[in-house]
Amino acid sequence: MKKEENASISIMKIICVTIILILISGIGVMAVNTDLKDVKIVLQNGYEMTALTSKATVSEVLEENNIVLEDNQKTIPDLNEEIASGQSIQITDKSYNEVQIAKISEEGAKTSLDQLLENYAPITEKIVVEQVTTPNKTVTKNS
C-alpha cells in the first residue's frame, strides 16, 4: 500500500513541476513577443521623464503614465499619432488662436467662414533677392 501511495505522490510531483515549467515558459514567450518602446515625455514645466511602454499611440502612453491634459494644452505629436521607440512627446500650451478656433468649432454650423478666418494669423509673403558672386573660370589653351 505504501509503495502505491509513494508512486502516486511522485507522479503528482512530476505533474506539478511540469505544469509550473510550462507556465514559466509561456510567460517568457509572451515577454519576448511584447514590443516595448522607450519614450521621452517632456511636460509643460520642462520636467522630462522616460517611459517604457508597449502602447501604440500618444494618448495611450499618456493615459498609462497618468498624465491628464488640460483644455489649454496640446501634445506634439498629436494625441492620435502612433509613437515609435526613441520618440519624444512634448506637452505645450495651445495658442490663443487655437483656443478661439476650438471654441468656434464647438458651436457647429452656426459659425461662419469669416469667424473662422479672423482667428487665423495672417500669412505674410516676402520676396528676398540675394546677389551671389561666383568666381570667373579661367580656361588655358596651348596653341
Image (spheres, rainbow, N blue to C red):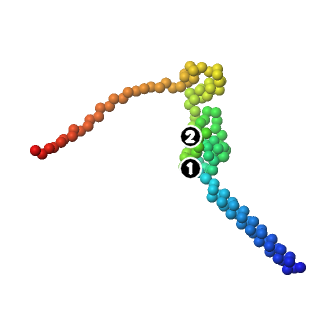
Can the viewer see residue 47 in this picture?
Answer: no
Q: In the picture shown, does residue 96 fall above or below 31?
A: above
For the point 85% across and 80% down, the residue is 3
Within the image, what quadrant is residue 97 found in? top right
Q: Nearer the viewer, residue 52 or 85?
A: 85
Which residue does the numbered mark 2 point to in the structure image?
77
Within the image, what quadrant is residue 45 found in? top right
Q: Is residue 121 left or right of residue 111?
A: left
Within the image, what quadrant is residue 104 found in? top right
Which residue does the numbered mark 1 point to in the structure image?
85
For the point 75% across and 66% down, the residue is 19
**Where residue 111 is drawn, which disc sits there?**
none
Q: Residue furthest front?
A: 143
Name the residue type under label 2: Pro
The quarter in which the N terminus is drawn is bottom right
Q: Is residue 48 left or right of residue 4?
A: left
Can the viewer see residue 9 in this picture?
Answer: yes
Instruction: Provide residue 14's location: percent of width, then percent of height.
Output: 77, 71
Q: Is residue 132 left or right of residue 78?
A: left
Q: Nearer the viewer, residue 70 or 129?
A: 129
Instruction: Provide residue 115's location: percent of width, then percent of height.
Output: 58, 21
Name the residue type under label 1: Ser
Q: Secondary structure at mark 2?
A: loop
Q: CA distance from mark 2 to mark 1?
A: 14 Å
Q: In the picture shown, does residue 73 fall above or below 127?
A: below
Instruction: Provide residue 76's location: percent of width, then percent of height.
Output: 56, 39
Q: Nearer the viewer, residue 56 or 91?
A: 56
Q: Nearer the viewer, residue 37 or 88?
A: 37
Instruction: Provide residue 117's location: percent of width, then percent of height.
Output: 54, 22
Which numbered disc flags the more N-terminal residue, 2 or 1?
Answer: 2
